[in-house]
Image (cartoon, rainbow, N blue to C red):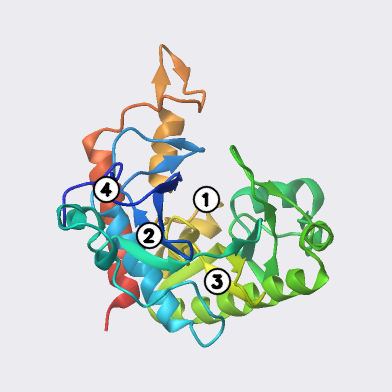
Amino acid sequence: MTAALHTSNITSLPLLARGKVRDNYAVGTNRILMVASDRLSAFDVIMGEPIPGKGEILTKMALFWFARLGHVCPNHLTGEAPESVVQAAELPQVQGRSMLVKRLKPILVEAVVRGYLAGSGWKEYQDTQSVCGVPLPAGLKNASKLPEPIFTPAAKAASGHDENISFDKVVALIGPDVAAQIRDLSIRIYREAADFALTKGLIIADTKFEFGLDEQGRVVLMDEVLTPDSSRYWPVEGYHAAFTAGQNPPSYDKQFVRDWLESVRIDGHPWDKTPPAPRLPQEVIVKTAAKYREALDRLTAA
């Protein structure tokens, strides 16, 4: 594992954007170098301390799923080595944590699929017995498995929280044909991934996908896919006891950090979830890194 990388500094390529985790650089006019840092965001605030190895783990998981799901939908990978487009001195910043991808026209909708009721979906269900306009049966509990996976999209926000929207709103935003394509592809990808993950003792409770359009107008899967940053992974062995007790199942993502942040008191008051974030203690950093690593190890174990 290389040294922790909080922010990349590739000076040989123009910087396009720094996201919460990824730094994107232009490679000519038709490719992008995506570098996954070890940054971690919670409640839309980037923590001051990186999680060592996180960017490499996210990249390995994304590449694993892109390869496994390539028959379902084309993706943005070029197949070229990221190391081939940077200077020798910059190699340590990209090795193992980057992807060289096609430049697409982003579809500005978060394609969220839920197989279980959790997070914002559970909160919305309690208020309306539906999620994103999709009616659900009465009597469901936190972490209940849904009768069928549902498509619960969100509008991508430039900053702050994305907003859950109905499928009708997606149609209004991007048109009926593309809306139907991303809905159907998202549910199919989720089903295949969730079925496979179960064979490894993992539940994928929900996930979000991002899509773009290529020069021919085809819908292409992009960004990351089915990582602990974009998906809620639960170990099968911890699910039933937590569900029965009405608790959130243990998870392989940043929920551990979120729970710690919720417990923090600053001058006797809870953190207000605005920058700067409280400083993460070493034990939280180590445990979070271990959770990400275990998810990858379980998923890719022979």
The residue where tag 2 is placed is 33
What is the C-alpha distance between the residues marked 3 and 1? 33 Å
The residue where tag 3 is placed is 221
Mark 2: amino acid:
Leu
Task: Give the label, 4 or 3, closer to the camera.
Answer: 3
Task: Give the label, 2 or 3, closer to the camera.
Answer: 2
Find residue 49 and report its image quarter.
Answer: top left
For marks 1 and 2 on the same chain, the one whose residue lies earlier in the sequence: 2
What is the C-alpha distance between the residues marked 1 and 2? 40 Å
The residue where tag 4 is placed is 287
Mark 3: amino acid:
Leu
Find residue 294 and report its image quarter.
Answer: bottom left
Question: Are the residues tagged 4 and 2 within 8 Å (C-beta)?
Answer: no
Given the current orientation, which residue lies at the most extreme top position? 267
Given the current orientation, which residue lies at the most extreme front position? 28
What is the C-alpha distance between the residues marked 4 and 2? 29 Å
> x and y percent of residue 11 in the render?
28, 46
Q: Nearer the viewer, residue 84 or 118?
A: 84
For marks 4 and 2 on the same chain, the one whose residue lies earlier in the sequence: 2
For marks 4 and 3 on the same chain, the one whose residue lies earlier in the sequence: 3
Task: Give the label, 4 or 2, closer to the camera.
Answer: 2
Q: Residue at x 53, y 53 (%)?
A: 245
The disc label shown at residue 199, or none: none
For marks 4 and 1 on the same chain, the one whose residue lies earlier in the sequence: 1
Q: Does the image show residue 261?
A: yes
For marks 2 and 3 on the same chain, the one whose residue lies earlier in the sequence: 2
The residue where tag 1 is placed is 247
Q: Is 256 located above or below residue 208 in the figure?
A: above
Q: Residue at x 48, y 61 (%)?
A: 29
Q: Is residue 169 left or right of residue 285?
A: right
